[in-house]
Amino acid sequence: MQAVGGALSSDSEGGSSAAVDVSIAGLSFQVVVIAVFIGLTCEYVWRYRKGQRITPRTTPLSKGMILVAAYTLIIAHPGPVFADLDEDKVGREMTMVSDPEK
């Protein structure tokens, strides 16, 4: 959102209040997300130091579920969903990214 606000501001030569509002909304969203992240991190550290058991759920993985997930991806691979992409277009985009002069 900050990039959109900056783009709007550059197009209007600094006279657009909507561009400033979009930039402020983007900054506000960023502050909220960082505050939530800090809160969750503090809770994790607090529980860790308190001695509560915080462990990842690896028990299903140790009982063969990882094999089931792997075989499911082999059988029902998501690649065919994206088969309609134009390979020529993808190739041009890759060329543009690697060499902007072409």
Image (cartoon, helix red, strand yellow):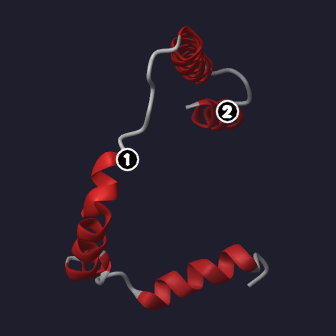
The answer to whether 87 is drawn above or below residue 65 in the figure is below
Q: In the depicted view, which residue is nearer to us: 22 or 46? A: 46
View extreme (bottom): residue: 88
What is the secondary structure assignment of the residue under circle 1? loop
What crowding class fits label 1: few (fewer than 14 Cα within 10 Å), some (14-19), or many (20 or more)?
Answer: few
Residue beneath the point at 68% across and 20% down: 15
- Taking 80 as reference, is 20 above or below it? above
Dividing the picture into quadrants, the one containing residue 67 is bottom left
Q: Which mark is residue 2?
A: none
* Percent x, y of residue 37: 55, 21
User: What residue does disc 2 label?
Assistant: 6
Closest to the observer, 64 or 2: 64
Is the residue marked by circle 2 packed among few (<14), some (14-19), or many (20+) residues within 10 Å? some
Quick one: SS at disc 2?
Answer: helix
The residue lying at 79 percent from left, 80 percent from top is: 101
Q: Earlier in the sequence, mark 2 or mark 1?
A: 2
Q: Amino acid at mark 2?
A: Gly
Of the numbered discs in the image, which one, if any, rests on residue 58? 1
Q: Can you say which quadrant of the picture contains the N terminus?
A: top right
Q: Say which quarter of the image contains residue 87.
A: bottom left
Residue type at mark 1 is Thr
Percent of width and height locating residue 21: 56, 16
Query: Where residue 98 sits: x, y (%)?
Result: 73, 78
Q: Give percent across and percent down for residue 60.
A: 27, 51
Residue at horizontal 62%, vertical 30%? 2
The answer to the question of whether label 2 and label 1 lie on touching residues, with beta carbons closer than 8 A, is no
Question: How many marks do you count on the picture?
Answer: 2
Q: Is residue 18 visible?
A: no
Residue 90 visible at all: yes
Q: CA distance from mark 2 to mark 1?
A: 45 Å
Q: Nearer the viewer, residue 39 or 63?
A: 63
Residue drawn at (65%, 38%), measured in percent from left and top? 7
